[in-house]
Structures are given as C-alpha cells and as structure tokens.
Amino acid sequence: MTSSLIIIPTYKEVENIGLMIPAVLDQDPSYALLIVDDGSPDGTADAVRGLMKQYPDRLHLLERPGKQGLGTAYILGFRWALERGYSFVLEMDADFSHDPKDLPRLIKACSEGADVSVGSRYVKGGRVENWPADRVLISKGASIYVRLITWMPVRDTTAGFVCYKREVLEAIDLDKIRFIGYAFQIEMKYAAWRSGFRIREIPITFKDRVKGSSKMSKGIVKEAALGVLSIRWKSLFHAYRK
C-alpha cells in the first residue's frame, strides 16, 4: 500500500497531464496519484487512462460530468483517500506551476511535526516566476487581506500546493467546507488552524503555466474576496472540527 496520495483536479489539461503523471509518480514508489477530471472535452481523461497500465495500483481516475469546481473535486478526493487509508494527502495543480520535485519536502514536513504543510510563495526563499508585477501584487495583497480578517498565521493563504496528514482530514467536518473556487484553499487552511492543527510553510518557486489556459475568472476572485468575510463570521458560531 502506498502511503501518500497526490490529488490533481483537471479540466482541459491534455497538454500537461501526460507529462505530469510520470513527473509525480517517478518521484517515489510510495506515491499514488488520483486525477479528478470534470468532463474535459479535450481528452484529458483518455490521456490518463492511456497511462494507467504503466502505473498499476498507483494511478487512479475519477470522472465527473462537467465542471463542478475545484473545491468539490478535492473534497471527493479527500474522502476517496480516507477510505483507502493513505497517511498523507496532497493537493497540486496539473500545469507544472507546482514542481513535483517539491513533493518530498512537503511530505517530510508533515513527517517531522507539521499537520499541514503549504508550498509557499511568500515566505523566505519562496518566489514567483513569469508573473507580471500586477498579478504578484494582487496575490500578495489578497494574502495580507486574508490574514487581517482571519488572523491566520499563514503568509500564502491561497496556495494550492498542500500536504495534509490524514488525521487532519478525519477531524475536519468536510461537509462544512462550502467554497468551490480559490476560497476553498483559504477555508481548508483556516479550518485546519481553527481545529488546532499545526501549519508549516515550505518555500517553493511557483511558475506560471506554459501550456493550456488558466481557470481564473472574475467570479472566482469575487468568491475569494467575499468568502473570507463569510468564513470568519461562520467560525464565530460553528466549529469546523467534528
């Protein structure tokens, strides 16, 4: 049984997924990979199936009929991982903005005392490549805004490169995680922190995608901005922990 499951949600990532799968699984024989594809019309799921014989028992695919959101894809993946007994459950993107070579560092941090480790752009040693200055400013400003509202001691609050110990996902009531876009990343970190778990940030280099198209939209940004206020307000009356 492999001990670490990496979850990658996909929508129209056929240009990247065939390269990403071996880049992840060749890191360590203890890694397994779950792709959650939202009905990609470009053949992403077919590309995954084409590699499943190469990685028997380590490469898995869940298909959903149409776009249902990042957050629901991860929640589905979390439940799938818990049912199968994985010790560490990780999130990452399919577009190589997260470097698969950093996976061991995130897992090591959770093996050495952290309950959640975050691949962070905004701690010492972390950086962003190939982003225009205005996008970096918006991203950093968003993280500052989140910290001011929530008081959460995390510098890269919207980061999507994360490792959870299974105990964290078992303790959090996943039915109470309501956001499906980038606010999902904020809410999961906040839920873990409010539940008493230790979060450690690991510096990474975040690279903008080269292939495929970004899934960012004004609606996702709006959800994140307004969602932070909702997350903080809700936490005053309801605990995330079971």
Image (cartoon, grey):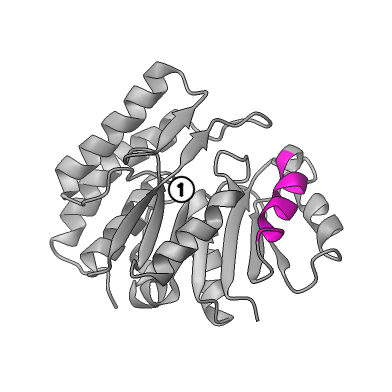
Magenta span includes 162: no
Predominant secondary structure, magenta span: helix
Judge whether 53 appears above or below 201 on screen: below
- The secondary element bearing badge 1 is classed as loop
Q: Which residues are magenta?
A: 16-27
Q: Which residue is mark 1?
A: 160
Q: Quadrant of residue 25?
A: bottom right
Q: Quadrant of residue 57?
A: bottom right
The x and y percentages for residue 141 are: 27, 30
The x and y percentages for residue 221 are: 38, 34
Judge whether 139 appears above or below 7 on screen: above
The x and y percentages for residue 154 are: 27, 49
Judge whether 228 appears above or below 200 on screen: above
Q: Measuring 56% from the left and 38% from the top, which residue is drawn there?
A: 97
Looking at the rendered image, the quarter that the C terminus falls into is bottom left
The x and y percentages for residue 186 are: 33, 50
Which residue is most to the left?
236
Magenta span includes 25: yes
